[in-house]
Amino acid sequence: MKSALSDQDSCLLRASITMGNRVKLIIFDFDGTLVDSRSLILESHRIVFSEFRLPVPSPADSLALVGKTLDLILAQLAGSTAPIRDMVKAYDLLLPQLRADPALAEKPFDGIADLLRELSSSPNIVLGLATGHTSVTVAPALAALQWSDFFRTIQATDTAPSKPHPAMLLQALEATGVKPENALFIGDTTYDMETAQAAKVPSMGVSWGYHKAERLAAAGAQRVASTVDELRDQLQILLAD
C-alpha cells in the first residue's frame, strides 16, 4: 500500500519518533484505539448509576474520562462520597452480561484486526496492551475477539496505577526487555499521551477515539492518525528501517 504521507512528513515522522532507534515494541491502548466501546460504556453507566439511585451522567461526561481507571471515573462522575467500591463491583458483575449482547459488545474499528494480525506476525516486533480495564475485565474481551495471542504483555489497572502514571508502560518495557526509545505507545486520549511522556516512550495518537487530534498533539503525540489505513502507513514507515 502506498503511504499517504509526503516524503517530508515521512522524514519528520522517522526523526521525531525513532530518533535513529528501531521500534521493537508497540503498545496499544484498548478502548477508543482498538475497539469502539461507546455503547457498552454508556449502557453500563446507565444501569449502575440507576441501581445506586444516582443521576446518570451525560454521554459526553462519561466518554471524556475513558482511559482512566473505573474508580477514578466513578469518583469524578458520582462524587467522592458515592459508594465507589460497591459500584466497581457492580460493573464487574454487569460487564459479562452486557457483552453477551452483540449490540453492546466491543467492536474492533474497521481494519484494526488485520493490522494487529500483520504486526503480531512480524518477527521483529512484539505487541503490548496498556488499558484502563482490570485484567479480569479485559481478558474476556480479548478472548471474544480472538486477540489474546497477539500481545506479549498486557498491563491493566489491577497491576499498575491509572494513566497518566507511567507504570503500565514501564512494566511493559521491563516485561519485554525493550528500552523506552525502542517502543511506541498508540492511544486515543490525552491520558495516553501523558503516560507516554512520563515513561519517556514515543507516542502516536489516533483521532477516531475519545479525544480530538488537537488535544492529542497538545498532550505530546508526535503524530496523529485519522484512519486505520493512515496508522498502517505511518507504522510501515517506522518499521522500514
Image (spheres, rainbow, N blue to C red):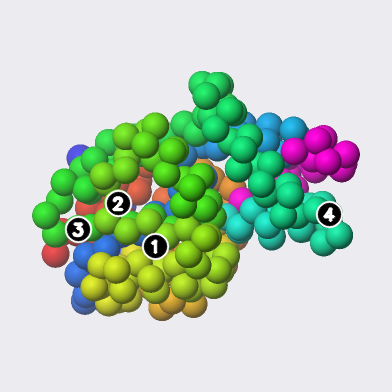
Q: Amino acid at mark 1?
A: Phe
Residue 26 versus residue 46 in the image, above or below: below
- The answer to which of marks 3 and 2 sits earlier in the sequence is 3
Give the Cα distance between marks 1 and 4. Answer: 33 Å
> In percent of the image, x 65 and y 42: which residue is there?
91
Q: Which residue is mark 1?
A: 185
Mark drawn on residue 209: none
- Residue 71 in the image: state x and y as whole percent: 68, 57
| Front residue (pair 166, 6) | 166
Q: Is residue 195 magenta?
A: no
Q: Which residue is mark 2?
A: 151
Q: Is residue 8 visible?
A: no
Q: Which residue is mark 3?
A: 125
Q: Is residue 80 visible?
A: yes
SS assignment at label 2: loop
Cβ–Cβ below 8 Å for labels 4 and 2?
no
Q: Which residue is mark 4?
A: 82
Q: Residue 108 vs residue 188: left or right?
A: left
